[in-house]
Structure formats: structure tokens, C-alpha cells
Image (spheres, rainbow, N blue to C red):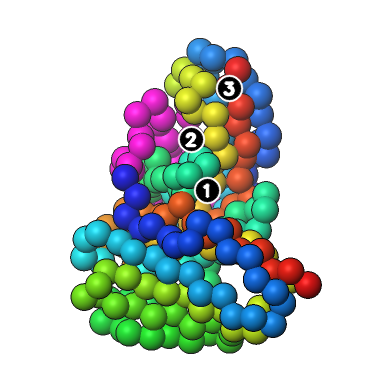
Amino acid sequence: DAGITQSPRHKVTETGTPVTLRCHQTENHRYMYWYRQDPGHGLRLIHYSYGVKDTDKGEVSDGYSVSRSKTEDFLLTLESATSSQTSVYFCAISGSSASYEQYFGPGTRLTVT
Amino acid sequence: SQQGEEDPQALSIQEGENATMNCSYKTSINNLQWYRQNSGRGLVHLILIRSNEREKHSGRLRVTLDTSKKSSSLLITASRAADTASYFCATVKGNNNDMRFGAGTRLTVKP
């Protein structure tokens, strides 16, 4: 998976609790992305980062925040988890803008009860 | 909303046959990419085709792009059981980082 790890790989949490997912890369790539994958929707972009401390919103950013304090780590936080945020979350990296290919991590399966 | 839409949603073929998957999109694009996803795994990049290109090959993969029809196709020749996976097209507009994925085609290759 191109030097990308995600943690945890599985998590079950209760509605209203905060949750943080971590993406770690060893490729020194500039761009990092968070997506969610739901049946019938493909992947949808939540947030992305184009450098340390530089982030921007994607298509479905409501209810999510991100932080990138180091090149290698990109954190996704669900401020107050809801059942609609039950999904599989994928991190991806790219050496350039999305004009070039992205490399994906193994995913985190999150269940909000 | 999704930019790309794959067709068919599911495809089942015998080993050795060719598999063709189609992707349609709505607006102008910078490039279109195809990804593969095995069950329970992350996506793997297969091929990227730019808006000024019409066809690209990579091993047993052939991708075409018709910008006038806003459509692309992915052909896998001489399919193998190991090609069983979901295949997604993704479109990129301009030079931004907003890559939009379709819902995917689930390919099953029977041995």
C-alpha cells in the first residue's frame, strides 16, 4: 500500500463521542487526502492537505476536521460522531496535485452506534 | 455528487474473455483515472488518461477517452480470475484536488 498506514483499522464508537483517525506515510508526499466510501456512492473527498498546516475542504466536509502538523501524518477528527458517519475511511497520498495518481491506504472501518 | 458513473454496475465473465467497463461524466475534465479495489482493500491506481489523449495501454488494459461524448472505457483483455475486483473511474477538473469517483463496476471472472 505504497508506505501508507491507517490506524485504527476498525473502530466502534457511540453517537456523540469524538473520534480521530490517523494516516501515516513514509513517502514524503506533499498531498494527503481523506475519503469516505459508502455503498452506491463510490469514494467522496472529505478534506485534503497540500502541505504542513495547509488543508482545505472537500465534497463532504461537514462534521469533520483535519490537522497536519508533520509531513507524514494527517489526522481526521469526527467532532461528535453520528450514525451517518458509519463508513469506511481511506487515506490517500500524491506526490503532486490530483492531476497525478493517488496511492491509497488500507482503510479504516468505523461504526457509530 | 459523483462526476463519473460506471456502467454496468456488475459484470460476470469467464476466464479468458474480455471485460469492458464504461464511465460517463458530466463536465469538462483535466484527466480521467481508473482504479481497482479488491474486497476489503484500498484502491490501486491502474491508468491515467489526459483530456488531450484518446487511448492508452498498459499491459492487458486499454483505456479510451471520448471528450465529445464525455465518456471513457476500460478494456481488460484475456481476463483472469485474479482480475475479480471493483473498478472505479475518477475525474479531475482543472488543476484542483477535487477528484470525483463513480460508484464502480463489480467484475467477477469465473475460472
Q: Is residue A75 left or right of residue B67?
A: right
User: In the image, residue B111 lies at what x, y percent?
Assistant: 78, 72
Q: Amino acid at mark 2?
A: Leu
Report if the CB atoms under discs 1 and 2 are less than 8 Å apart.
yes
Residue drawn at point x = 61 percent, y = 27 percent: A111
**Of the pair A102 and B56, the residue shown nearer to us:** B56
User: In the image, residue B108 lies at what x, y percent?
Assistant: 66, 64
Select label 3 or label 1 by which is in front.
3
- Give how far apart the Cα atoms at labels 3 and 2 are: 15 Å
Residue B87: say if magenta. no
Q: Is residue A57 left or right of residue A88?
A: left
Q: Is residue B54 left or right of residue B60?
A: left
Query: On screen, A34 above or below B91?
Result: above
Q: Amino acid at mark 1?
A: Cys
Disc 1: host chain = A
Quadrant assignment for the N terminus of chain A: bottom right
Q: Amino acid at mark 3?
A: Val
Q: Regarding mark 1 in the picture, which secondary structure is present there?
A: strand
Establish whether labels 1 and 2 are both on one chain.
yes
Residue drawn at point x = 60 percent, y = 54 percent: B42
Q: Give the residue pinned by disc 3.
A: A112
Q: Give the residue pinned by disc 2.
A: A76
Residue drawn at point x = 36 percent, y = 54 percent: B100
Query: On screen, A91 above or below A26?
Result: above
Residue drawn at point x = 57 percent, y = 75 percent: B19
**Would you say residue A24 is visible in this rendering?**
yes
> Which labelled disc corresponds to residue A91?
1
Packing grade of label 2 (10 A; few <14, some 14-19, many >=20) is many
Please, which residue is most extreme toward the top here?
Answer: A16
User: In the image, residue A20 lies at what x, y percent?
Assistant: 54, 29
Range of residues picked out in magenta: A50-78
